[in-house]
Image (tube, coloured by chain):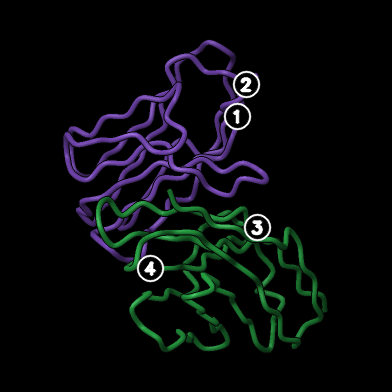
Chain colours: A green, B purple
Amino acid sequence: AQTVTQSQPEMSVQEAETVTLSCTYDTSENNYYLFWYKQPPSRQMILVIRQEAYKQQNATENRFSVNFQKAAKSFSLKISDSQLGDTAMYFCAFMKVQGAQKLVFGQGTRLTINP
Amino acid sequence: DAGITQSPRYKITETGRQVTLMCHQTWSHSYMFWYRQDLGHGLRLIYYSAAADITDKGEVPDGYVVSRSKTENFPLTLESATRSQTSVYFCASTQGVDEQFFGPGTRLTVL
């Protein structure tokens, strides 16, 4: 079974700073996807970024980028030039390619951006 | 409205009562999922469905029942609610190995 671990329950940074959220996972699969989801106070789950395991290049979406280390089973999220609207819970998630497309989530990191 | 909707958004019930949470999606996605969100646990999968009339258990299925007679609907029933089922419930859908789209969630309180 796959497991996902987020070791930082809470983080807080000043607006415009860069922040990195950590995520590690455990799997015996070779082909899989990794995701970061954002959950603002509205409770809506919003996809931030995805990474296919077979791609060596780290995914980037505007101010959001990942550091994917497949051998170390690490998948961190970097937010550059943080904004007040980035305040949210962030969840790391894993999905196998084979079989049902189930997501396995980490426990979440509560990120607060201070003005 | 296009997308994925859940009803009710909030529900308070008593121990032992049956409760059904509704989920409806307009994309005709094959896969649908039910997750519960609890502090310290993230989201955990309760049940999922790969197509109409095909359902399977997830990580925490005890006390829950699902059905999927139509592709667009995936109701979740708590047959006899317990306090430990107090949670926020999310429905999600996807067509395949890709992003899952989540509903707005249902906050359920069992007294």
A31 horizontally vs A4: left or right: left
Q: Nearer the viewer, residue B22 or A56?
A: A56
Q: Amino acid at mark 3?
A: Pro
The numbered dot on residue A33 is 4
State which quarter of the image contains the N terminus of chain B: bottom left
Count neighbours of disc 4 (C-alpha within 10 A) and say few if under 14, some if 14 to 19, many if 20 or more: many
At a point 26% along the width and 39% down the height, the residue shown is B73
- Report the label total: 4
How far separated are the C-alphas under marks 2 and 4? 35 Å
At a point 31% along the width and 66% down the height, the residue shown is B98
The numbered dot on residue B83 is 2
Q: Chain of mark 3?
A: A
Which is in the foreground here, disc 4 or disc 1?
A: 4
Instruction: Establish if B76 lies above or below A54.
Output: above
Which is in the foreground here, disc 2 or disc 3?
A: 2
Instruction: Establish if B106 lies above or below A64.
Output: above
Residue linked to disc 3: A41
Q: Nearer the viewer, residue B27 or A79?
A: A79
Dot 1 falls on a residue whose secondary structure is loop
